[in-house]
Every structure is written in structure tokens, then in C-alpha cells.
């Protein structure tokens, strides 16, 4: 396959995969789809990768059982082969790449890695190719290629592409994996009035007026480590619930991709719309609940989220009036957050009080164990108020 990428147009097309919506500036694509459509997904023109692949014919044979390029394409389609290239788009420019490491992944390789090195990040076998040698047809057989094991550290410094039968996201919708923005009301959507933290407006739970719009936002998000071994991207799902919005089937965030190259960085755009979780946190919603999970084969989500309704008493305080349970039973996910936040507590300034993890932008950081090698998911959540 490395032979294909000596063609600059094919290499540029590989880099352009990072620009596809949902790929988060990270190279990922299903080769079965590419060979079936034969179009460059970014520009809807003839795929340079497909054209170059077909033109190479016998040079691309990788098995004695595959006699021609058509059989190899049939193998790719029949086995749903895809490619991942963590770090390539962010760390390298396509016109400066003169070497390419080509690797392959199977579930058996990952299982063996976990058995032999349970604390490691995983490695896959690979060969390193000089694109210059390929252009000059200096490589006549695979015995002359440099073989090695590669992982995150290697791929950060060397352009690396991994082929394998990777599972597809099962929940992502065609609009980019974002569910409906919730909150129980449409007030405030489309307004140009700036939202501010309650303390900036001198507000608390009692002084918020019925005409005020209380939004709830997660403006900062970070993973301190990967949720899966090399070379898989992280995929995060988030359900946001209140008494007026019980999100049991459609997550707010549907397996959104968190690239390996973004690990240990504070992201301000991971949650869309400036981190907006709820457009209008009305006083009938005593609390908001968040359930978070990451994609993990052979795991299972079995969670119950509890939300409450509330009413304002004659003294101005709030009391609960009813509750509801929202249950989750999903395969291939690992839960790492199931927590509620109280409306009055947040409006009264709880978001400014450190819970042991410091502050980010003046807002408390919440930290949750990913149950994997001590890694954490960290984020901030806070209300913001629009007062007309």
C-alpha cells in the first residue's frame, strides 16, 4: 500500500481525510467506502488513491493467495478494511513527507499486547518505506524493508498509517455526532445578548428572574490519557438529563471523536456551541444529570440517572416535587461519569469552588477516573445567565 503514496496526489488525499467533518483534524477513513465510491470524499472528484492503487497492479500483491489487484480490492471490501493515521495531520505537512511507516492492526494483536504488557499503550507491527526509493523503484521485494513495532511515541515523530478492520462508530449521526441541545425550552436560542456567569451579574438562585435565561455550559474538556490502546481514537458519548428532558436513547454527544493527538490538552471546542449543554435551565428542573461513557469493546453501560422537579415556595426557596429514573443499557461502552448538579447550588456559586482539582478559567475542574491506567477525564461546568 505504501507504493500508492509515492504519488503526491494520493498522499495529499490521505492528509485531506483529516478535513472530513467528524474526523477532528485526524486521518481516518474506511477503504471499503473509498473503493466503492471511487471519489475523493473531500472534493467529490476521482480518488487519487483508488486510481494509483489500480494502476500499480501486480506490485501491490501482498499474499500468494491474491493473484491480482482486483482480488486485493475485493479483500479490502469484504473485510471492511480501514485506515488510521494518528498524529500525521497535526504533526506533519504532506509535501515534506519522504518516509512513510505502514502498519497493520488486528484484535488479536491488541489482545496479545494487553496480555504481555497490560500497562502499555499498545504496539503494532510495521514496515518503514522510503518514498524516494519507491519513486525510483529501488525496492524489489519485502525482504529489504525495515520491520519494526510502532506506537504513539513513534508515530508522533514518524508519519505512520495503520490498516485494519476497525469497528465503525455506531451512534454517530450524519450531522457530526451532536444530538439536540436540551433544556426544556427554546428561549434564548439565537439571541445576541451576551451570557455571563451569575457572580458577574450579582445573581444567585433567589434573585434570578423568570425572564432570565439560565444556560448550562461545559467550556473546557480534557482526557489525560487514551481510553483505548494504539491506534484507536477515543470516542466519547454524553447524555444530559433533566425532568423535562429524559435522554435515554439519543445521546447529546454521539461517540464524538477525541484524537490521540489531543490527549492531555484542554479543548474549548470539544462540546459544540461554546460548550452549551442546556439552552434554558428552568427552575422546574431541580437538577441536571450527566452520564458519560467511552467506546470500549466487551464492556457494558448499566446506569440509572435520577432527576428531580422543583417548585418555588412562598419563602423563595425551592423544594423537590417529583423524581424520575433514566436507565441506560448499552453494549461496548464504559461509563465514567454519572452525576447530578443542583440548579440552586450552581447559581449560588458552587462552580467557583474548587473540588480538589483546581480551577480552569476561574471555574472548578471536575475529574473522573477512566478506570484505565490512572487516566482521567476532566471538565468544567457552569451556568451562564442572559438578562435582557
Image (cartoon, grey):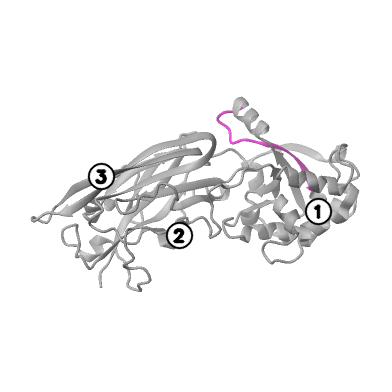
Question: Magenta stretch?
Answer: 117-129
- For residue 214: magenta? no
Q: Determine the residue positioned at 60% across, 43% down.
A: 232
Q: Mark 3 vs mark 2: which is more N-terminal?
A: 2
Q: Which residue, given by chain and number where applicable, does mark 2 sit on? A: 272
**For discs 1 and 3, the disc positioned in front in the rendered view:** 3
Q: Position of residue 262 (x, y in %)?
A: 53, 50
Q: Give the residue pinned by disc 1.
A: 4
Residue 202 lies, with reference to residue 142, above or below; the image says: below
Describe residue 123's horizontal placement relative to residue 208 as left or right: right
Q: Is residue 119 magenta?
A: yes
Residue 72 numbered tag: none
- Callout 1: SS: helix
Seen from the viewer's position, the closer of residues 78 and 59 is: 78
Label 3 SS:
strand
Alpha carbon of mark 1 to alpha carbon of mark 3: how far?
Answer: 59 Å
Q: CA distance from mark 2 to mark 1?
A: 36 Å
Crowd band around label 3 with a 10 angstrom C-alpha radius: few (<14), some (14–19), many (20+): few
Tell me the quarter of the picture where residue 17 sits: bottom right
Picture residue at 29% right of the left edge, 44% below the top: 324
- In 3D space, how far apart are the residues under numbered discs 3 and 2 (Cα atoms)? 29 Å
Q: Which residue is mark 3?
A: 323
Question: Between disc 2 and disc 1, whose residue precedes?
Answer: 1
How crowded pointer 1 is (Cα within 10 Å; few <14, some 14-19, many 20+) is rated as many
Which of labels 3 and 2 is toward the front?
3
Residue 320 seen in render? yes
Amino acid at each position: 500500500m505504501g507504493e500508492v503514496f509515492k504519488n503526491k496526489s494520493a498522499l495529499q488525499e490521505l492528509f485531506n481525510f483529516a478535513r472530513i467533518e467528524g474526523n477532528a483534524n485526524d486521518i481516518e477513513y474506511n477503504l471499503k467506502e473509498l473503493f466503492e465510491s471511487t471519489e475523493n470524499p473531500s472534493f467529490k472528484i476521482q480518488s487519487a488513491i483508488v486510481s494509483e492503487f489500480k494502476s500499480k497492479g501486480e506490485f501491490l500483491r501482498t499474499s500468494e493467495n491474491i493473484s491480482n489487484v482486483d482480488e486485493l480490492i475485493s479483500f479490502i471490501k469484504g473485510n471492511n478494511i480501514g485506515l488510521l493515521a494518528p498524529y500525521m495531520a497535526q504533526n506533519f505537512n504532506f509535501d515534506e513527507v519522504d518516509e512513510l511507516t505502514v502498519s497493520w492492526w488486528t484484535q488479536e494483536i491488541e489482545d496479545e499486547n494487553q496480555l504481555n504488557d497490560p500497562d502499555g499503550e499498545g504496539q503494532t507491527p510495521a514496515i518503514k518505506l522510503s518514498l524516494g526509493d519507491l519513486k525510483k523503484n529501488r525496492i524489489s521485494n519485502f525482504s529489504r524493508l525495515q520491520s519494526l513495532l510502532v506506537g504513539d511515541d513513534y508515530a508522533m515523530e514518524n508519519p505512520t498509517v495503520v490498516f485494519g478492520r476497525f469497528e465503525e462508530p455506531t451512534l454517530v449521526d450524519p450531522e457530526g455526532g451532536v444530538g439536540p441541545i436540551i433544556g426544556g425550552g427554546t428561549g434564548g436560542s439565537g439571541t445576541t445578548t451576551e451570557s455571563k456567569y451569575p457572580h458577574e451579574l450579582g445573581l444567585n438562585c433567589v434573585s434570578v428572574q423568570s425572564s432570565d435565561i439560565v444556560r448550562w455550559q461545559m467550556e473546557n474538556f480534557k482526557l489525560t490519557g487514551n481510553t483505548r490502546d494504539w491506534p484507536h481514537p477515543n470516542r466519547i458519548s454524553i447524555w444530559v438529563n433533566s425532568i423535562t428532558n429524559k435522554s435515554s436513547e439519543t445521546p447529546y454527544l454521539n461517540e464524538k471523536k477525541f484524537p490521540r493527538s489531543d490527549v492531555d490538552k484542554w479543548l474549548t471546542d470539544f462540546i459544540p456551541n461554546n460548550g452549551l449543554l442546556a439552552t434554558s435551565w428552568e427552575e422546574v428542573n431541580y437538577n441536571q444529570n450527566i452520564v458519560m461513557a467511552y467506546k470500549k469493546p466487551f464492556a457494558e453501560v448499566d446506569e440509572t440517572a435520577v432527576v428531580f422537579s422543583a417548585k418555588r415556595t412562598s419563602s423563595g426557596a425551592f423544594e423537590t416535587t417529583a423524581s424520575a429514573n433514566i436507565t441506560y443499557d448499552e453494549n461496548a461502552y464504559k461509563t465514567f461519569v454519572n452525576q447530578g448538579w443542583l440548579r440552586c447550588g450552581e447559581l449560588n456559586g458552587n462552580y467557583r469552588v474548587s473540588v480538589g482539582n483546581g480551577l480552569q478559567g476561574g471555574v472548578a475542574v471536575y475529574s473522573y477516573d477512566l478506570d484505565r491506567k490512572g487516566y482521567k477525564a476532566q471538565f468544567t461546568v457552569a451556568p451562564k445567565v442572559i438578562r435582557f
